[in-house]
Amino acid sequence: MKRKAMGATSSCHDRRLSSTFIIPVEILEEIFLNLPPDQVVCTCQLVCRQWKEVTNSESLWVERCRREGYRPRNASRKPKDWKLFYFMCKKRRNLLKNPIAEHQFDNWKIVENGGDKWAVEDVMVPHPDERVKKNFVTSYFSCMKSQLIHLEKEGYNPSFMDDFQPAIKISDWYAPRWDCGSQYEICVELLNIEKKPIQTFSPETVHFEQWNDQQWNQMTHVFQNYGPGVRYIKFTHGGKDTKFWAGWYGIRVTNSCVEICPSEDI
């Protein structure tokens, strides 16, 4: 009899405890908004059904985006999944590997290797980004190199790319030598699953005369409203010197960048 009474008391006590710990949704959301987002997704949603529902609610991630300044670039194209949109904004980064020649030509495919071939040297004049200490340098016949970015492998799934079509920002830095003429070329392509171009950025070749100021220049472009189907980004750049001098007197390139930019701040 005594054991049954204890059991009944324990059961009633458990029910009272469970009702005591039900937290209003508004308070729960505010708590989650003040926790690291990874902790919310990986830990909080495992606690109970209520917490899981709140961590996956649209209102939580809309508010999180609002507080951190992540707004859709196109107001008429709202995200279908605000949590995904938030994390895509958080993970914005340079998708090109080894952009500042820290590891020689790792991750780059040499397309053309004319003259005395590509080389890596220290920058001749300081780069605007003081972290950049090295650059790739071309020779007296065409030198071109490229990288192919597989978007899904980088975490950008096809449905997100097709439905939301985030802006794709490219940037490249190039500089001539002061004592030799040179030229710079760049071509960036958005490719479909068959690696055929959907949209291309290929500006006119940039020419530098001999006895120039050898300062750094930046090339930028933003792809927008490119339509569905983009699965790869192919980045190709390079150039040559125009005096046909032996050695490495051609254009210098470094600090190349390709970013996926879901929010309006691009």
Image: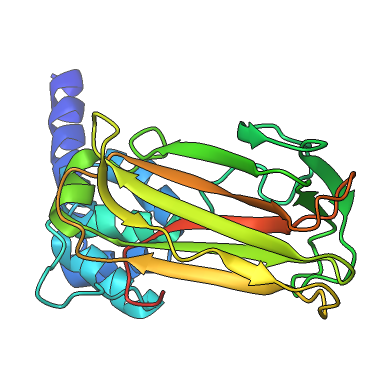
266 shown above or below 84: below
Q: Position of residue 236 (x, y in %)?
A: 52, 46
51 shown above or below 261: above
The answer to which quarter of the image holds residue 182 is bottom right
Q: In the image, what residue occupies the spot 83% across and 36% down? A: 116
> Which residue of the protein is positioned furthest toward the front in this rendering?
243
Residue 140 visible in the current orientation:
yes
Residue 22 visible in the current orientation:
no
Q: In the image, what residue occupies the spot 19% across and 22% down? A: 2
Q: Nearer the viewer, residue 236 or 114?
A: 114
Left or right: where 262 falls relative to 158? right
Q: Nearer the viewer, residue 11 or 103?
A: 103
* Quadrant assignment for the N terminus: top left
Q: Position of residue 67 (x, y in %)?
A: 35, 79
* Quadrant assignment for the C terminus: bottom left
Q: In the image, what residue occupies the spot 28% across and 39% down? A: 231
Identify the colour scheme used. Answer: rainbow
217 shown above or below 194: below
